[in-house]
Each structure stands twice: as structure tokens, then as C-alpha cells.
Image (tube, grey):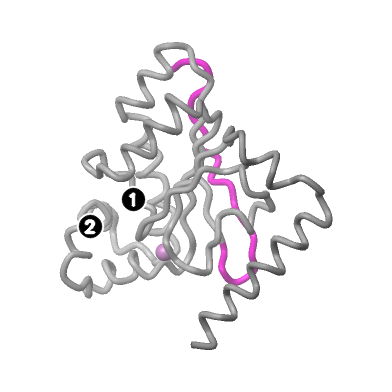
Amino acid sequence: MKEIDTLLTNNKLWAQNVEKSIPGFFRTLENQHKPKYLWIGCSDSRVPADQLIGVMPGEVFVHRNISNQVINTDINLMCVLQYAVDVLQVKHIIVCGHYGCGGIEAVLQDQTPGLLAHWLENVKDLMERNNTPSLDDMCELNVRLQVRNLALNSIVRRAWDQGQTLYLHGWIYSVSNGLLHDLCITRGGRST
Ligand code: CO
């Protein structure tokens, strides 16, 4: 089981290195969880939230699913969202899509297997409303749609109504060069 053992060995080295460069790092983290950001991204292994925004453990609360969907009946995401907004009081929610997203591509090619067709229904609607969009266009449109869904979400709206500082951002990541692109659709602030 060499490929699995390697991961555990890597972990020991990583923990040692972090502790060496920031003595007491883990001990300090043990008693606090105050991330400022909630990241909603794709499960794609090429889009690792923490790494590509250069943050350390403790800085970003993360939820990932296939094609970074924000679906108001998704109990998993709704629990994450409620905890992030009500308890952690994050200041920013980032929806991050990526170019070449496999889920979006499957919808475009009408090749979504089984459950995925159900999961990606909103993407299919989006595609049908837009005239033969390219894959990259669809990946961007998908981020825009999910930010819109968030802006209509009752947890988010209640936070805004109560004057809580909360911004929503839509970003897209390019797997081919490692860069994030801001779609400039930031919403929110103290209230809307
Ligand atoms: Co993806």
C-alpha cells in the first residue's frame, strides 16, 4: 500500500515543517476557529482551495461539490452555510468555478451519468437558456448563477437584514495557468 503510506509520511513531514517555521502553530489553532472566508468550489482535484489562495489551516472554511453548485435544498451545503454565516460569521463567501469543469462539460455533451444528471439540472437549464455556449462561457455562467442563488438564500438574506457584513464573490480558476479571475459580480456588504 505504498501510495497510501506515502500520504502519511508526507503528513509527518508537513507538520514538522509548519511547526519549524511557525513554532506553536498547531497549539494556537487548537483553541480557535475563526476563518474569514467560506469557499464553495468544485471537487475537482486540480482546484485545491487552500493552496491556490495561499492560506494556512484555519483561514478558510471549505465546501466542495461537483461543479460548485449552490442548491437551496442541499442539506449539506445549507448546514455549512448556516454555520459559516451565523456562527463563524465569515465576511466573504467565494463561489469558485473553473474552466474545463468536467461536470459542466458532461451537461454540454448530454452525457451526465445517473445521479449527476439530477445534481446538475440547474446547469442544464442554464445551458438551454443560453444559445450554444462554449464550455468556458458555461463555466462562467454557472458561477454567476450560483452567486445569484446565494444572494437569494434565506440564510444570506437574514444576515444582510441584520446588518451583518457579508460579501459574495464569483471567481473562476484556470487549471492551465494556476490563476484566479474575478468575475466582478461581488454583492452585499452591510445590507442590500
Ligand atoms: Co469542476
Residue bearing the label numbered 2: 119
In depth, the one of 58 and 158 nearer the eye is: 58
In the rendered image, residue 180, in percent from the top left (x then y), is placed at: 61, 55
* Residue 140 on image: x %, y %: 44, 54
Q: CA distance from mark 1 to mark 2?
A: 8 Å
Report if residue 45 lies within the magenta region.
no
| Mark 2 CB within 8 Å of ligand 1 | no
Query: Is any part of residue 82 visible from this angle?
Result: yes
Q: Which kind of residue does numbered mark 1 sit on?
A: Gln
Quadrant containing ligand 1:
bottom left
Stretch in magenta: 174-192
- Image position of 141 with respect to 61: above or below: below
Element assignment for label 2? helix
Residue in the image at 58% along x and 46% along y = 182
> Is residue 179 shown in magenta?
yes
Q: Nearer the viewer, residue 27 or 111?
A: 27
